Every structure is written in structure tokens, then in C-alpha cells.
Image: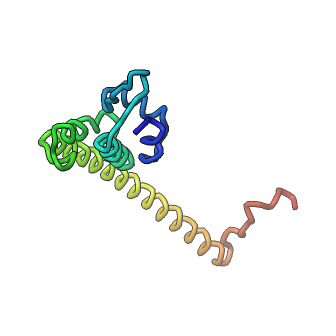
Amino acid sequence: MRIGELAERAGTTTRTLRYYEARGLLHAERTPNGHRIYNEADLRLLQQIRMLQRFGFELEETRPFVECLRAGHPSGDSCPASLQVYRRKLAELDACIAQLQGVREQVGNQLARAEQALDELANASLQPGGPQPQCELSSPGA
């Protein structure tokens, strides 16, 4: 199949395919007049690359999966190098999740403090002699 058909079937652009080729992830046969020709195995490689990128993998991280498929394995993740990339990616995700959980805890604590301060202010305004409630949106002297 020609580059346009492969791009359409893979849901990408011809420019992307040329970029993958320049990065050594995709190899095209050439016709005598220089047109790129691809086969179903190339489509399978592209599907593997695109799936991994949807999961957040960098393009270079897809290389072991592509090489695994090229070696004739039934899937791109049936080689030790691919499994190592999965492990590394999971460690990165775990670190990001831990960082986000820490930030979430800090924001939750800040919210709890703000709500408590607001409740204390509201309760104080109900006490005789307490501060008079004011609308924050009103202008002074209005």
C-alpha cells in the first residue's frame, strides 16, 4: 500500500509516517520511481506505536515494542526490553500519582482551614457585639 493509504488506515498523516521513518521506526520499500510501499506488518507497527503514545509513551519508548514485532513476535510486548519499558513507565506513573496525592492532601487541608475560618467568622457575627457581616462585593460607603 502507498503512504496515503497507510496513513488513512492508521488514523494519522503522511507527515507523521515520514517522521517515523526518519526516526528509524518505520521502514518503507521503494518502487522504481521512488514511491514508498508498505504492507500489513507496517500497519501493525503503527498501531502499536499509536496505542503506546495514547498511553503517554514517548516516541523513543516505543522502539523496543517495534523491534519486538519486527523480530516476528506475536505482540510488541512479548520481549524483555518491552517489559522493561512497561516497568519504567509504571514507576514514572506511580511517582506522578504520589506527587498528585500529596498536592491533593495539601489543597484539602487548605480548604478545611478556609472553611473553618469562614465558619468561625460566621459564628462570631451571630454573637452580640460580634463583627458585622459585610458583602465582599459591595463598594465602601455604599
Residue drawn at point x = 19 percent, y = 46 percent: 87
For the residue pair 31 and 102, the one nearer the viewer reads as 31
Q: Could you say where residue 85 lies in the image, as x and y percent from the top left?
A: 21, 41
Quarter in which the N terminus is drawn: top left
For the residue pair 6 and 131, the one nearer the viewer reads as 6
Q: Could you say where residue 5 lies in the image, as x and y percent from the top left?
A: 46, 42
Quarter in which the C terminus is drawn: bottom right
Residue drawn at point x = 35 percent, y = 49 percent: 51
User: From the viewer's perspective, is residue 132 above or below residue 62?
Assistant: below
User: From the viewer's perspective, is residue 18 above or below residue 125?
Assistant: above
Q: Could you say where residue 123 lies in the image, as x and y percent from the top left?
A: 59, 75
For the residue pair 22 and 83, the one nearer the viewer reads as 22
User: From the viewer's perspective, is residue 39 above or below residue 19?
Assistant: below
For the residue pair 79 and 75, the one nearer the viewer reads as 75
Residue drawn at point x = 42 percent, y = 60 percent: 109
Q: Could you say where residue 104 lies in the image, as x and y percent from the top left?
A: 40, 57
Taking the view exactly as shown, the residue that stands out farthest to the right is: 142
